[in-house]
Amino acid sequence: MNLILFLIIFPFVISLILRPNLLPEGLQKGLISISTLVLAVASIMLCFDPNEISSQLLQLTFSHYQQLFLFVVEIGLAILIYYFSFKYDKIWVAFVNTIQLMLLIVLETKVKFNLENNIGNASNLFTKSIFFIDNFSIIMALIIGIIGGLIAIYANGYMKDFHHHHKEMKDKRSSFFFVIFMFLSAMFGIVFSDNLLWLHFFWEITTLASFLLIGYKGDKVSIDNAFRALLYNLIGGVGFVVGILYFYMASGSFSLDQLINAGKSGFLIPVLLLAFAGFSKSAQMPFSSWLLGAMVAPTPVSALLHSSTMVKAGVYLVIKLAPALMGTWAGILVASVGGITFLTASMIAISRQNAKSVLAYSTIANLGLIVLCAGIGSPMAVWAGIMIIIFHAISKGLLFLSVGVAEHRIDSREIEAMDGLVVSLPNLSFLLLLGMAGMFLAPFAMLISKWAVIKAIIDPAPLLLIPIVFGSAATLFYWVKWMGKLLAITTNETNNPNNTNKTTAATLEKAISNYEWCALYPLGFLTIISTIIFPLTSGFMLEPYLSKHYNLGAGYFNLWQENIILMTLLLILLLLLPLLSKIFISANNKKTRVTAPYLAGANVNDGYHYQGSLQTMKYTIRNYYLESFFGERCWSLVGIILAIVTMLIMLFSVRF
Amino acid sequence: MSSIIKSPWVIHYDGSSCNGCDIEVLAALTPRFDVERFGIINTGNPKHADIFLVTGSVNEQNIPIVKNIYEQMPDPKVVIAIGICAATGGIFKECYNVQGGVGEVIPVDVYVPGCAARPEAIIDGVVKALGILQKKQEEWKAKVS
Amino acid sequence: MSTSCLTSGLLYLLLAPLIGGLIAGLDRIISARMQTRVGPPIWQPFYDVCKLFSKEHLVVNRSQTLFVFGLFIFMIITGLLFFTGYDLLLVIFAFTLASILLILAAYKAGSPYSFIGAERELMQMMAYEPMVLLVPIGIYMVTKTFSVAEIVKYETPLIYYLPGVFIGLLHILTIKFRKSPFDLSSTHHAHQELVKGLTTEFSGPSLALIEITHWYENVLLLGIIFLFFAPIPWVGVLAALLIYFLEIMIDNSFARMKWEFLLKSSWWMALVFGGGNILLLMLLKR
């Protein structure tokens, strides 16, 4: 059994089964849970014998029939997009779609012409395998299989609740899961394809799938945002096709591997065009608004788009191209786009009050950091970039899913509504805090990656560290103030021994379905475990991958092993902190007395109210959002202009 | 342990005083008298304070506040009533809203007389309170251990 | 790890509270003299801490103690990492973790004063973080290493190459030492800000821990100043003490500023002096 084909075809088959909505609800949920489990197991099995798989892979070569098939299907997809764009009157989408279609036709006729006249050894095209496998694609497959699968399980519970909250909507759950599984299938396709036509085919499927998912609610805002996502991704897609065409004309090949090798020897234009496609998919600065618009979709969709799929496809491609970008001016400019995105997105996140919006900006910022690493392209930078992909996927998945649950329980997405969530939803807020800590706090793996980023950039391009240091400061600010909001208890629910609210807190959490917990706890566990097994991931997965691509001597990575172990020890210490502090707490236990907070002596009732001049008042506490400093409009404009200028310079610098 | 008498931190609360005593309390902090020589700090936060300095009488409005502040001070703690108003209500005693001295609301350990009380007298009162504080600390320790 | 690193780590663990406490005592005496007062005895900070340990432990909720204790542990570890010669970037990250734990403790207490104190402390962190990160970056660009043990061995004093970074560092040290004009979140002085801001809700043993942590922190910061003069140790010690004296002087001669000024000035200083210094190094070393 070829595992890779299985990973691509199996979710596709499941999605086809789910589409007609024939199964009863229980069976449907069971099928989803079991098939995600199968996917997870299959992607884990992939780690164990990649050699055997790769030998099977070589037999799967490209053929002219495949090409025709792809051509027909892509035309089908284009017609579908035409249908949607005319139905909702979105001319721009149709326009970009037309360009892409025309380019595809040009490509097809060109290939046909070459074959018929046997120009430049054209049949060589069909000796190369369409798939490939290496450690990076295995890592991506693990992310898609495990995290994507967990999100699908979570969606089981969430979508039921969602339709309970949105009674006005038709229950289209079966088509929802149809698209989700299609999405997973296409993602597996992307990370294993070496043939650019296949890669582009899967790429377009994810574009279309994300369009359908974002527009799931069907109201005007959702439709508009869905079309924006479609438009931006189609623009990227056009870049992709131009890249393929250009590369084919120059070398007569469709292999990604050969494209990267050509890039290494200075043939950078197709590399940059593909990187451009990666920018649009991973929501880099001029394109970032589609990812923000994607927030309107139900939370599992946001989680899927932000953590394990879609945007990760973009950075996957850019990181793949990294060896070609290393040490070039174009690479530095790619990195600058990433740096600009990181800085501006981090600063804007400070001024956002909506929890999902903060998460979205943080995603964009982290993707910027990954692109930055890819642009530098040195082994250490790529190492850091892949590490950020892994940890970001886990933590962000956890955060989105937790926020989704919280949203249904407290009926708000606003951070300001999350006062003292630690009391009303204790387990959930623990997971939220864990996810946030995973995103920026010291001993967690994310920060080790950031540490590696700084080390990787400091020699080739020290000035790029300036956006990183300022962006990191902003990152710190928006995460900690959110954490504070969750922790701040402004009622005396915990202190009052004979209060009745405790029971309501418990019931609030009871309403969370088991499907949701089934996704949340493993993700929380993964956040911790991924840091602890960090040296192993590095040793067994990344180092072989990097040594293969960069001809590194043995011992290149030994230098930092010591520090990584140190970080792991710090994490263990942090986890043991509650136990350690028990010693201090119990030593002072007899001396401890719980009192109300200081309210200038005017406390009344339970101590959490105060005597105002006319009546008893409840104090409220609000976070800083610094709208005037970090306003969204101002900084996104700055980011977009800077990024566009950088990209133009990038494209022209290669020409001359 | 004698550290408590070497570092008495005070909180100063003004009841319904004429501000005469308050100015004298603040005068004690100025370079001329410099109570920081004895480690005395005016904290302004009951949760950090050991000594509660009250000036002025208590009235209906500030009874709960005085009680709250006293309540929110960590043990061991002492209360010093500064000036004649804080001791008995002074010239405000007959006012319709005045309850009387601070002693009516919370237990007072040291009374510093004067209208207004002189800084020397205030410092003297604090020093006297330190002896009481030490005694209280021993009692409190016996209680919690 | 060499024995000398181990000894210096051990010395830090044992002596830092003593040195930090004495510096705090000196600070109070010098401040008092600047205000023509006599001031407390030099051992005063130790009396204060002893007293606090013996007092009742008032809390708003019991879990806030966890964060305070975490602050204490992680600040010590940060210092140990530094003085045993580990990676300077890791030291900075651990330092950040410790500071965040203090902020979370203040948030947890949930009182309006400590909440605003925490917000302001966070603002201060955002203000100083870029510069704090630029220090190891600048040092790396000169010495080509992040390891403190290696940096100390570098033959020329770093101040020759990094005057801009040093000036930027001086600016944010005022924030880190909690000195006026940037003591927005909490202050040691009798002129209170937000009651006691960040530390309003901590009393007794918790407050004592925070105080001791502050001593450890100060010694670590002085250690970072020392790095700039490391090849000539006596100059390093002298410079560290001189800088601290300068901070006391600034403390006593400035009024407290608003947060806008804090944020803007810190970021501009980091960008102009820190970034400018790094740009120059990049151009010169090429």
Image (cartoon, coloured by chain):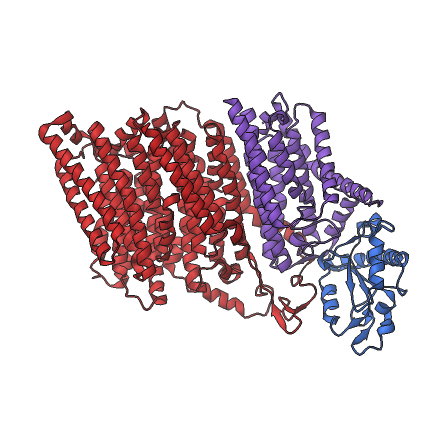
Chain colours: A red, B blue, C purple
Single out the residue that lies furthest toward the left: A116
Confirm whether residue A526 shows in the render: no
Tell me the residue at 80%/53% (across/down). Answer: B8
**Viewer-proximal residue, A353 or B79?**
A353
In the figure, C226 relative to A31: above or below? Answer: above
Single out the residue that lies furthest toward the top: C155
**Viewer-proximal residue, C89 or A591?**
C89
Number of numbered tags placed on the structure image: 0
Q: Which quadrant of the view contains residue A201?
A: top left
Q: Is A447 displayed left or right of B78 in the figure?
A: left
Relative image position of residue A316 (x, y in whole percent)? 34, 39
Tell me the residue at 85%/44% (across/down). Answer: C38
In the figure, A595 relative to A481: above or below? Answer: below
Q: Is C81 displayed left or right of A211 in the figure?
A: right
Relative image position of residue A263 (x, y in whole percent)? 31, 28
Q: Which quadrant of the view contains residue A330?
A: top left
Relative image position of residue A333 (x, y in whole percent)? 40, 33
The C terminus of chain A - image quarter: top left
The N terminus of chain A - image quarter: top left
Q: Is C134 displayed left or right of A589 in the figure?
A: left
Q: Is A637 displayed left or right of C139 in the figure?
A: left
In the figure, C116 relative to A342: above or below? Answer: below
Relative image position of residue A441 (x, y in whole percent)? 51, 44
**Viewer-proximal residue, A488 or A52?**
A488
Confirm whether residue B127 shows in the render: yes
